[in-house]
Amino acid sequence: ALSYLRHGAACLKFGRARKRDALASLNQAIEIGEQHKAPYTEPLPPGSGNPNERFTSGPSTAARMAIRNCANRMEAGRRAGGGGAPPGGNFYGTAEGAQMAEGSTTSSEVGLDVYQLWVARYTLGLTLQQDGVAQQALTSGFQPLLAPEYDRLPIGCRIASLTGAASCLSQLSRRVEALEACEAAVALGAGGEVLFAKALLLAQLGKIDDAIASLKQLLQSAPGHMRALSALSTLLMHGGQLKSAIGMAQAAKESALGDALPLQQVGLLRLRQGLENGWAEDVHIALPDLQKACEKHGSVRPPQIACDAFVGLALCTGFGGGSNDTLHEALYHLKTAAAADALSPLPPLWRGVLLQRAADETASE
């Protein structure tokens, strides 16, 4: 089993070219490892043991130290707002991953200890999830790691298993179960991205107040978390708190200098405030942020999310003056918006509004 685990780890280092071989070896390692599971030995307390000591049953001291180091890194990531999960698909590229995969089997052993089984299943789950096979990643990788036998591993491993399962469940639109997994991880001390995922799931389930509370909890430990600030801004806007939403969007913009999305969000919120209240000044203030956002998105092949930015820029331009030049410029921006998202109704809608407005002005003259 250990040989298959080593082979799977080696194949993953070659990327997609050897991913099929990696999956086959990981599955084989898990199958043999489960049939010939090594006895469990309690982890050593921090600072004890001889790194050169070898055990004929259970993991080696080096493997124990490695998983403890991995747990420490998870805890450091949690405090920094990183979510508490161990490294991603390149887990074997770290010293911890290599040591944990190594373990301590003698020539008479063919199975894996609980540490190595955790590494094998977790890596299998990550690899399958990256390939978009969420159901298989859940059933073969993350879900078995929630069994009681893995509860004896450091809390960081449990958090990683829960967040992996939550991610797969979310992809499968099983949001209630995904939320339960996120809440279990948060209860164990996870923060950062886990709290962010929890907030998104709460919002999708219509629990807006709880989602806002989760985002505020995250921002207490990571005040510069751009996506949390942007998400909170969006929720506040839908709650009718437009002024507070603009403040959060402005904070997101300041925390991610040069990012197109916060610029777009600030510009659209100011534009909305100006149009709703008839404040030409706010419409004018929105223009620079929307211009910068559109420049960063690019007008040749803009991403789908850029559609709203170009629509906003068209409205700022079209309502800023009644000349033919401004109308043509606004219509050009709407054409770019339609190129970004051909299914959006906004570009043709506002094209009609601007053309009707120009026709009415011509008739009145």
Image (cartoon, grey):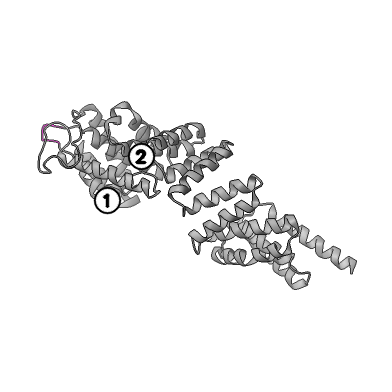
Residue 116 picture location, percent across and down? 24, 37
Q: Is residue 60 visible?
A: yes
Q: Check disc 2 and report the residue beneath it.
A: 160
The circle on residue 335 is none
Which quarter of the picture shows residue 249? bottom right
SS for tag 2? Answer: helix
What secondary structure is the stretch in magenta mostly built from?
loop
The C terminus: image quadrant: bottom right
Q: Check disc 1 and report the residue beneath it.
A: 93
On whether residue 108 falls in the magenta region, the answer is yes
* Apparent side of residue 9 relative to residue 171 in the rendered image (left or right): left
Q: Amino acid at mark 1?
A: Gly
Q: Nearer the viewer, residue 345 or 56?
A: 56
Between circles 1 and 2, the one closer to the viewer is 2
* Apparent side of residue 287 relative to residue 20 in the rendered image (left or right): right
Mark 1 and mark 2 residues within 8 Å of each other at the beta carbon: no
User: Looking at the image, which residue is at 60% across and 58% down?
Assistant: 266
Q: CA distance from mark 1 to mark 2?
A: 17 Å
On whether residue 174 falls in the magenta region, the answer is no
Q: Amino acid at mark 2?
A: Ala
Whichever of labels 1 and 2 marks the residue nearer the N terminus, that label is 1
User: Looking at the image, which residue is at 46% across and 48% down?
Assistant: 220
Q: Residues within 10 Å of mark 2 (few under 14, many from 20)?
A: many
Residue 325 picture location, percent across and down? 74, 73
Report the magenta residues as a range.
Answer: 105-109
SS for tag 1? Answer: helix
Considering only vertical position in the picture, is 272 above or below 59? below
